[in-house]
Image: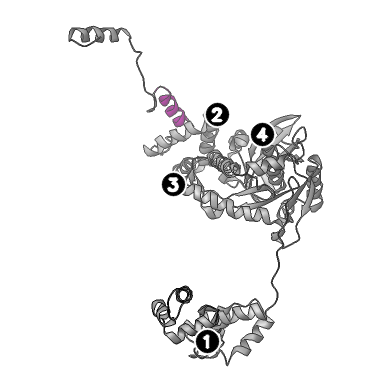
Amino acid sequence: MVTDAQVRRLRRLSKTEKTQEVAAAKAGMDVKTARKYLADLRPPSEQTPDRTWRTRPDPFERVWEEVRQQLDANPGLEAKTLFEALQRQYPGEFADGQLRTLQRHIKRWRATEGPGREVFFAQRHVPGRLGQSDFTYMNELGITIGRQSFPHMLYHFVLTYSNWEDVTLCYSESFESLSEGLQNALWALGAVPLEHRTDRLSTAVNNMSNDKEFTTRYEALLRHYRLEGQKIQAGKANENGDVEQRHHRLKRAVEQALLLRGSHDFASVEEYKEFLRLLLVRLNAGRRERLAAEMQYLRALPERRVGSAKRVKVRVDSGSIIYVDRNAYSVNSRLIGEQVEARLNAESVEVWYGGNKVEEMPRLRGRGKHRVDYRHIIDWLVRKPGAFENYRYRDELFPTSRFRMAWDALREVAQPRANKLYLEILQMAAQEGEARVDEALRYLLEAGEIGEGKLNAAAVRAVLSEQAGVRPATHIAVDDVVLASFDELLDGGAGMGVKQ
């Protein structure tokens, strides 16, 4: 087959050689072929006609009309699904290796006869106009805290012009997480765009008591920062396309940074937050030029942040429990019967009474959960030990596994008095320190001191008294250094001929 390069060489040689025969020989082709290409200015690649015939029989010719009708009715059908249906309908007629042929047929049909595809219109981003935000789950990256699974999500904020971004770690799509994340981003940026676009926020609405409450608080947040709020259409995530795309790229950047780090495990949540902060500093470093251009169009921040916490008035019931956001929390028994204010932050619940904060505890995730601190109620449980056996939140009164082991041991050897003996030990933990009592229980359990009269508050107190006079293994005594000893070394060295 003659190539384009041969024809180009032939045309050059035809201008310098005496005869066409010599030029054709040097170009590596027959004289008649040379005359043909010298007469036709088109290269060989343009003279080859397009092939319009098949090189082998079409195995789907007989059934194609049936396949096409199915595609007309359901354009979303995949080639593999249709191929498997044909194999079931016509046993032994179609081999597995013919799937690719059907895929090409269907691809050609979609391009020439199928329904039109959705068109995406590239947008012109105006500096300082729009910021987008959304929540994204991070569970697929397998991040752990202290070797324990750490399910969480990030609130992700992006400026559409410069792609400057910020994230806030959170655990649910609540309004508190939205408010804290948005404000964190704006104060880290140091300015405010004109508009803020989110998804439909249906999950955040469901996490609140009603739609009206969410709308009121969200609109108040936007007014405080003079932001114009926008929501995308239901099911149209592409309308929030910038932040959706940044979700993917951020997760990829986090995964690569974790691989470089050599571990997906962090010692604490604070260490993980610092890891994310440093990663964002590196990602935003490449956007400084566009961000600088955008900053001149952004508006100034207000004088202060707006409170993110949801405030509700609740009354402490007779069990020293308050119910906040459909979860139960214990408070000090002194507050029984009083009305307190619970402030729900993204990660904590604060309890205020008389203008003072009296309690703060981690916010429970989900609904129908409970958190009961034994320190709040232990004094009354000791007076009413019979209530312990069937207490609704009894499992919350075993702060560590050793406390549960101690109770189990007491039930075996001192059944009638097991509850009272255990509660006295738990009361000592509230007074002397949970960690110290836990260590004393470890000593007693390992020593086998679980017989009648051996595992009780008095025995624990005796262990604590003995441990008070024993230095822990981590304590190291270092004597003071006598500097005169160095003079003795120098004098001795001089006598041995050591240079001074």
Which segment did they paint magenta? 458-469
Q: Which of 485 and 401 is in front in this view?
A: 485
Q: Name the residue under label 2.
A: 431
Q: Nearer the viewer, residue 260 or 349?
A: 260
How far is disc 3 from disc 2 in space, using C-alphas? Answer: 43 Å
Residue that protrudes farthest toward the front in the picture: 18
How far is disc 2 from disc 1 in space, using C-alphas? Answer: 76 Å
Lateral position of residue 388 relative to residue 303, left or right: left
38 within the magenta span:
no
Where's the N terminus, which quadrant? bottom left
Q: Residue 359 carries which label?
A: 4
Residue 18 in the image: state x and y as whole percent.
Answer: 42, 78
Q: Residue 262 carries which label?
A: 3
479 vs 323: above or below = above
68 vs 437: above or below = below
Mark 4 residue element: strand
| Residue drawn 63% across the image and 38% down it | 361
Q: Name the residue under label 1.
A: 87
| Residue drawn 78% across the image and 47% down it | 218
Mark 4, residues whose alpha carbon is within 10 Å: few (<14), some, or many (≥20)? some
